[in-house]
Image (cartoon, helix red, strand yellow):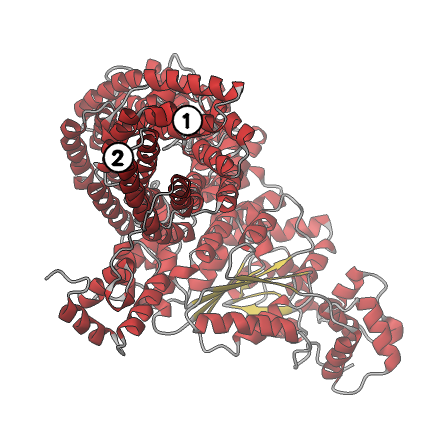
Amino acid sequence: MGIQVVSPVFVGRDEEARTLAAAAADVAAGRPAAVLVGGEAGVGKSRLVAEFTATLDARVLTGGCVEHGADGLPFSPFVAALRGLGDDDLDPAGREALAPLLPASARGPVAGGDEARPRLFEGVLRLLARMAEHRPVALVVEDAHWADRSSLDLLEFLVRNQQSVPSVLIVVTHRSVELDRAHPLRRLAAELSRVPWVRRISLARLSRQEVLGQMRHILDREPDPALVTSVYERSGGNPLFVEALLNSGEPGGVPASLQDLLLAGVERLPGDAVHIAQVVAVSTVSVCDPLLTAVTDLSGRPLADAIRAAVDAAVLAVEGDGYRFRHALMGDAVAAGLLPGERRDLHRRYAEALKSDPALSAGAPSFTELARHLFEAGDTAGALCAAWNAAADAGRSLAYAEQLQMHEQVLAAWDRVPDAAGRIGADRLAVLEKAVEAAYRAGEHVRGEQLATEALDLVDAGRERVRAALLLSQRGRLRAELGMDESLDDHRAAVRLAPDDHPARGFLLNALASRLLDVPLPDEARAAAEQARDAARASGDDPTEASALITLATLDARSGDLDTQLPKLARARSIAENIGAHRVTLRALHCETALHLTFGRLDEAERLSRHALDVAYAAGLCRSTGTGHAAGLVGTLIAAGRWDDALESAAHALELAPPPATHAHLVALKGFVALHRGDPAAAERAVGTCRDLLGDHLRLPDDPLLLPGLDAARLLAQDRLDAACAVVEKALEEPQLAATTYSSWPLLLTGTRVACAVADTGRGATLLDRLRETAAALPVAGPVQAADALAVTAEAAGPADRAAADAATAACASLGQPLRHAYALLGSARAALAEGDRDAAADALRTATALAGKLGATPLAGAAADLARRARLAVGGERPDAPRFGLTARETEILGLVAQGRSNREIAEALFISAKTASVHVSNILGKLGVANRVEAAAQAHKHGLGVAI
């Protein structure tokens, strides 16, 4: 027909273009934005995004996912998007972090270990932030329905953390109609849709009028109405099918089937070009010229002419240094049209080419692609070897899900390959061991437990005791993640198998001690940790020794011996810091912080939390381990009465996509503040979110009774007393109630308030008696728990026991924790009124009201006002001095940092808030001070002593 196959003018999609433009405007204004573009194959997703990015004043990074990505092409879209980076884009730290993704950028060996993957994710985010400092960046991920698991993990991480890099726009295209319920992208798209800055575009088919416009531009003339009707009806408005129908000939020659429709453009190609299309069709990645030469035997001008013909006919498209089908459906149709023998022969030729020159794989991991071609060619033995090597490649790239898949392929082929062990230099048990480790690191705990069990069935524990012991310990870790009681049995069995003189014994004992500490079984944990310490010292295993010392010091400190144990924790931390064992260092800081918080030393708890965040940031672990320390910081700030600061820090930590347990902990802490500020519905939503994250047991590892306590308190606030009683009754069945007193005493205090609310019922009286009995038997460690114990006694006794109420108030006042103090004062006021001491009651209510007002604790303030009204007491609320210039306490703190010359990013890092939040605070400060810039603000700060030490 002599027509253009592709319309030179983009037709329709005005609303979708406006959505993308709005996202770009958000990014230009410093707000995060991401867009998910979904639609059926051929509907024009890539064309829409290409037209949009062509208009952007931004650096555009584009990477496509490859078909069969789930079978092991780790991080393929990011490798493609970042392939063209220059030396100026990477600083030394970035090179090290990104080495698993971009090995060519590395200056030395690629580091592995548990910390490498979070460091990689953090490194990509920092790279985008570095690039966006000079010019906005648009990251485009194409065909995400083919993305490998690791790519989806990284994509989710980047989107959830966009607030820290607001000048980066993320656009993702994917097929939406072909995702079954189990497809990982379906879950991810649903979750990302709840992120406030994520927009979704569902690209529909074109209308008849839009098809007419498309045809007009393709034909370069006004099409015949009958042709428009025929093309529209047969294409259904799919732009790709419109093009294929027009390319097929006159109206009477319209293909009857979709396959004919898709193949029409290919069949019109000259012979060599058809062969090129067939070769490209059996590849899952773009194919470069040298690889096409190796597979087809074409080269020089004949090869160039064949490729040119396929590209000009819009069958193939150029992608980097290679070629792919312009639309995947065409490639599918061409591959489906090959005879089985033709297909096997092409895969065989690909395999031969890649074996002779792995560099021909055009950026894809060569062994992964080689394994696929060998499997498809029927060479199971060769495929097994290639999959084994591909698994090693994936491990070095930190793509643990893909590493597991490659190991699974090796295991699946094992029985069909003679002397499989000899071919790869490892027996089946060794493959299983590596698969177990990959499963653990990939978070595939169910599959990892199954593989570990299979491996344990193979190992001869009598002859290979250490091998069996390490497998048992690994299965114990996996079972712990799955909440299986058998976890502890595995760890104990591992230690029984380990020879006394083997270097691994200390490691296995330490794993057992750590698990026993978590359960907790303190006496057994102590014995195991002491043995682990001694074994580690004998073998020179410094990280294990440090970890064992942390366990021992934590056990002693939990029983009340804080001051003696703190130097031991510091010594263990010093060992870890000196050898660069970041996770052990952070574990020590976590234990130290928790102990200071338990013992009411809030300033030191805050200092250590912030130090831990600095360590986590420097190690590239801020968004994994670091968020756990952020939860500790939030808890400390809440206890200190700095609730607004706590909420800011919690919000920032949640932006970092923390692990489920940490996520739930942060949500629970936010729910606690919401409840005490008079929003029980928000607390109920928090509990619901935690249930989604943790399951119905609502048990946090670090604070097992926090969530039941929150749930009971919000039910009490909602006057749902039977339900509140049920929650408390269930919580009292916690098997480790006596071993986790730091978590148990707050639950008992809440439970006592619930029981007192229904004390005139049989259920309430029974529950109150049970709570008294539990409290009498529960150990007390430190002043915070002592204060809670006195408060439980006072609440249970009621207004009749003034001595108990005043003792609780005195203990709570000494802590410097305003919420505890205010509640105790309310109890003292009731008890004073019961004795007729109106002046003491008024004083207590006045102080309680002032504390509640500073916190914004409206229910507590309301309870105090109600008591004063009923007692006809004149209680004036004490308002704190109005801050100068109207600055809040947080703004005064930030002004001090501005005066020190800190940037918004440095302020954000110092206070653990987002850079965007810091920017908003600084803008508010400038406005309140009436100054034009930061220099003038600093001058005002020094002049008036605002936030500046003088």
Check residue 812 in the rendering and tell me which mark sits there, or answer none: 2
SS assignment at label 1: helix
Distance (Cα) linking label 2 and label 1: 17 Å
Residue 886 relative to residue 168: left or right: left
Residue 36 relative to residue 478: left or right: right
- Dot 2 alpha-carbon crowd within 10 angstroms: few under 14, some 14 to 19, many 20 or more: many
Quadrant in the rendering for residue 462: top left
Quarter of the rendering occupied by the C terminus: bottom left
Identity, as a three-letter code, of the amino acid under mark 2: Cys
Q: Residue furthest bottom?
A: 221
Quadrant in the rendering for residue 809: top left
Q: With respect to residue 414, does 239 lie above or below?
A: below
Quadrant in the rendering for residue 885: bottom left
Identity, as a three-letter code, of the amino acid under mark 1: Thr
Residue 694 relative to residue 135: left or right: right
Q: With respect to residue 759, does 10 lie above or below?
A: below
Q: Position of residue 688 (x, y in %)?
A: 53, 40
Residue 157 relative to residue 213: left or right: left
SS assignment at label 2: helix
Question: 549 or 92: nearer the eye?
Answer: 549
Q: Position of residue 873 (x, y in %)?
A: 34, 43
Quarter of the rendering occupied by the N terminus: bottom right
- Dot 1 alpha-carbon crowd within 10 angstroms: few under 14, some 14 to 19, many 20 or more: many
x 36%, y 23%: residue: 797
Question: 881 or 935: nearer the eye?
Answer: 881
Check residue 752 in the rendering and tell me which mark sits there, or answer none: 1
Q: Residue furthest top?
A: 462
